[in-house]
Every structure is written in structure tokens, then in C-alpha cells.
Amino acid sequence: MIKKFTLGDPVNTGAVVKSIEPSDLSGFPFEYRLDDKFVFRFSMEKSDIVYGLGEANRGINKRGWVYESWCSDDPFHTETKSSLYAAHNFIIIGGMNTGVFIDYPSKIRWDIGYTKADEAEITVGGTDLDIYVITADTPREISREFRGLIGKSYLPPFWAFGFQQSRWSYPDREAVDRVIDGYDSAGIPLDCVYLDIDYMKDYKDFTINEDRFPDFGSYVAEKKKNGIRLIPIIDAGIKAEDGYDIFEEGRKNGYFCKKSDGTDFEAGVWPGVCRFPDFMREDVREWFGSKYKRLTDMGIEGFWNDMNEPALFYSKEGIDSALDKAAELKGQNLDLGRFFNLKDTFTGLSNRYEDYASIFHTIDGRQVNHLDVHNIYGANMTRAAGEYFEKTFGEGSILMFSRASYIGAHRSSGIWFGDNHSWWSHILLNLKMLPGANMCGFLYCGADLGGFNENATRDLVMRFLALGVFTPLMRDHSALGTRDQECFAFENPGELRDIIQVRYRLIPYLYDTFKKARDNDDLIFRPLSFDYPDDKIARECETQLMLGEECMIAPVYEQNASGRTVYLPEDMTFVRLSGENVVKQELKKGVHYVDVELNEVPLFIKKGKKIPLCKPALRTALLDAEGAEFI
Ligand code: MIG
């Protein structure tokens, strides 16, 4: 059952597709306080689990930390961070069989046992909001009801289940060709190569640097003939440059976000000074969405939207005041306090609260301050693109995923989990985000495999990939200046091929599982506790997931480990997959140590279940799903 409570005059975020008559707040099932904020709390039994918050930090069980819904461009996903790129305001309170979705586009603080271990206190930063309370018999049912409320998840093209290679950046044709050759000559399957910001001319959206990518359309066609799609990045900021037609159109038509004096807001990002389309407006979304046509006309069939929290490196006001401060202090003997204050002034220039506060949007003809709607900016950028694609090409035609997101964007796009690190702990962080993301509708998702920031080791990449084999988005991506991270760049690439081939063998199964989850508002990935609620070890398990109706996954996540300890909540077949090899072993319910070689993908299949495994192929288009054997 879903109950809706409406407070004040909420912004229509577009998250919900079902219209529900609001109930009187007297029926709100939690203790609450309403003043200039809306605060509610619930207590938790020792064994209660709180799930959700989608793409968020820390565990599957969100207890024991404080989270903040505030879309943030933060490339250090350390354990103590409260905000990442998304605002997915949905939790399931296990013990109460209750789900809560707060449809509110600004800051929410989720203290889930941080201040008091057995109490959660949720603070919504304002008083205009819709809040939905869902009750059902099980967490899985709650999640299903919620997904019905927010509408069907985005469907990517089939080839988007292929392996994808990215880095910041492959700056020219030669670099892209080297990647494809590297994969082809090592016999490693591949479907997509990414174009990061350097394919553009001076970082201008919807332009191509013709020196580096001459005759882009023919080049795209040539790659596609070889079964490879190129996936360009699109950033939120539009370079403020006379003569750049998109900038000029936006300026002429008043499409950019404003400041309080009515002039366009500006801030520096990759291209230097930029203006920011007011994606909150439908006419602006239509305008911006239609610009993707420039690239689809050249044969492009997939995109990733970046920097749409929005990320701001600096504003003119911010730089000026920092420089003034520096000038004032010049020649003085700085004490510790003043030194650190000066230093922080410069490091604090990016994504500054004051800059966000100076932005205004137009929503339904009203001027709205950015702070009040921050969390739906990126979602609306992606919606602009997604709606254009669906209208023009139909569902399932274009690959689209975004960095920032809000629930609702799951209907037009997938997400990736942003700038992680080549850290062993980030394999598990990736795993732990998957069920939450699914609960919030984001089925097409994945992390940068191998880790984005800093140098990866071969074994890390392999273990990371062995988890990525199961995530709908399977993409290896790494940052500027890091060591080469393509599969063929490491010693004995045949062993990395063994892993990627397993992905291709599983694609028919994974695609089918994806489709079922989408059609039934279900999850691809579930915490073990969803399936074995009375099994204490399963309930507390944070390193394994259920996949579809048939499988359990348990990646190796520690360096120098020849395997891992795994818990089987029932008898299962342990399968080690590597290239075309399949080694099976029956295991009884209980704790086991399983050996897993670096080139093997561990998988556990439930008794009485079978999954299809087809022959590997170099491209998704060459897969023969019909010819699959069942294991
Ligand atoms: O400020 O486009 O998360 O995937 O490679 C960094 C360059 C901007 C952040 C994205 C990352 C991408 C990078 N971008």
C-alpha cells in the first residue's frame, strides 16, 4: 500500500508517474516535527536493516552513518563521505516492512543510527515536499511497489551489454584505433570505445575536433562496420564564446540559468567560462536534447552525460574574492589560522555553496533558487537527452547514462558511479551500491572497472572485471595520467580475455534477467537478506549478492588472495568460469573457502536452476544465443 503526504507546495520533480490522492498528515506513521524543516524519526531494533539510498556510500545496510542527499562532484569516495553524485531518496526500513520516498529536490540529511545507534532521524531541509510511505510484506514487495510508482526503467540497446573500454582520453583516431587493434589482436571481445572530453573542439559540446577526428561521420561508420560503437561524453556547461552557435542560441533565447540581476550565471569548467542550460524548463530540454542530433546524424548511438551536478570549478566572483584575499595577505607573516584559511579559500573555489546560491532557474514561470532544486539539475539534463532519443529513435535504441541523477531519471537513462579509485575496497563499494541503485529504478548501471583514479595493478583490474562481468554496464575507465588500464595492456592478456569472454557467454542470460527485472519492477541484484530473511549470516552479508532467480555472486576483493570465504544460504553449485572452461562443484549450505584463480569468474547457481551459456564472440552482434548450452 502506498500513502502520499504532501507538505506545502512541492516542485514537480517528475520522479513519480502514478497520481495518488494525498492523505492527511495525521496519518503519517512516524514521529515528526514541522517548522522550517520537516524532521521525522524512527527507532530500530538491533537486528533491523535499513536499505536504499541508491547510489550511495558505505554498506548495503545503511545503518551507522549519516548521509546527505546533495549531488556532489567528489572524486574521493572514502568511507566517511556523506554525498556522492546522486540523490536517491528512498529507503526500506526492514524491521517495519516500510519504504519511504521523499520527493524533495534539495538537501536531506539521513542520520541512520549516527547520533543514536538505535534511532534514525531524517531531516528534510525545507517544507515543500511529497513523501510516500509504502507498506508491504517483504522488502522486495516494497521495492516493487515503489518501482511501480516511479515508472519503468530505461532500456539500453542490446550491444550496451558488451564490454566497453574508456579512458580520459583517447584524444584522436590513432588512439582509438590502437585500442581496437589491441583488443582485436589479443582476441578480447569489445563493443564500445569511449570518447572523453578531448574529442570536442575546445571542450564545446556537440563539436568535433576535426584535426584529431577528421571526417568524423565516416570514421564512426568505419568503426561500426567492425562492430565497434564510439560513445562521446557531453558536459553540462556550454562554453561562453561568441560565434559558438549553441552558446549564441542559448544566450539569444534566454535558455541559460540566471543570477538574481537577470544576467546569465557563469562559472568555469573544462572549456573555461561556461553558461548552464536551465534544464528545469521544458523548452530548454527540448532545445538541448535536439542538439544530440548533430552526433546521431554522424552515426553515434550512445552518450554519457558528465559534470551535471552541476560541477563548477570556479566562478568569477569566487576567484576575485580569493585573489583579493591573497593580495591583502601578501607580504604579511601568516599565522597558522590565516595560512590555512587562505589555502582553503582556493581549494574551496569548486562547487561553492555561494555559487550555487547565486543561480536561478525558471520553473513553471517562477524564479527558483538553485539551492532549492539542486538535486534535479543533472537528472533534467539527462531527461532532455533521453526524451529526445525515445521520441526520435524509440525505446532501446540509444545508450545513455549520466553521472548526476535523481529518481525519475531512471526512466530515460542509466548511471555510472563516478570517479572511484583503483582501490581494492572499491570492488566492494561497487557491489554494495548495486541493490540500492536497482531499488531506485537504476538497472543499467556500473562502476569504472579497474578504478578511475590512480594506477591499477593487473590483479585488481582482473578481480574488478570479474564483478563487472555481472553489471549491466561493463566498462573499464581510468583517469588522465594513470597507467594504461586496457585489458591488453597487462602481462599475459589472454587471462584477461578469459574474463571478458565469460561476460559474452553470459550476455543472453544477463540481458534476459535485465528485461525481467524491468518488466516486473524487480531487482537484478538483491541483498541475501531479501531471499533468506531468517538466516542470520545471510542477513548480515555485505560481500555477496543474489542475481536474478538463479544465481548468487561473490567476487574476490582482496589482493594476493587465492579465493575467498563465501556463505551459501542453501546448497548450490559453485561454478568457475574462465574463457570456454566451466568447472563445477556441488557445495552444501554453509561457510566455504573457495579457490578462484585470477582468470576465473566465480558464480553460484541454486539447486534446480539452470542458466544459458553461449559461445563467446568478439562482438555482441556475433553472439549466438540460440546455440547456448545450459549449465
Ligand atoms: O573533471 O571528462 O567522472 O569519468 O573521465 C573530470 C573527464 C571530468 C569526470 C568524469 C570522468 C571523466 C572526466 N570527468
Image (cartoon, rainbow, N blue to C red):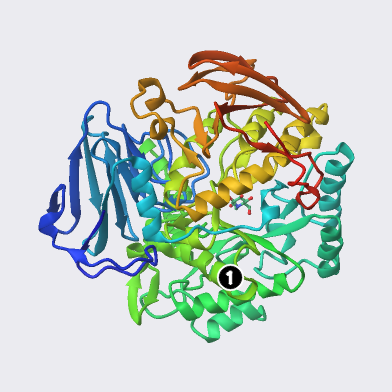
Q: Residue at x 36, y 59 (%)?
A: 149
Query: Residue 26: x and y, percent?
Result: 10, 57
Q: Vertical placement of 233 versus 560: above or below?
A: below
Note whether ligand 1 is within 8 Å of mark 1: no
At mark 1, the secondary structure is helix
Provide residue 319's location: percent of width, then percent of height. 48, 60
Quadrant housing the C terminus? top right
Give the camera-side residue of 153 and 211: 153
Q: Quadrant of residue 470?
A: top right
User: Is residue 561 among the parts visible in the rendering?
Assistant: no
- Disc 1 marks which amino acid? Glu
- Depth order, front residue of 234/351: 234
- Left or right: where 175 falls relative to 338: right
Q: Which residue is painted at 33% across and 59% down in the image?
A: 106
Provide the residue designation for mark 1. 390
Which residue reaches farthest front? Answer: 608
Q: Residues within 10 Å of mark 1 (few under 14, many from 20)?
A: some
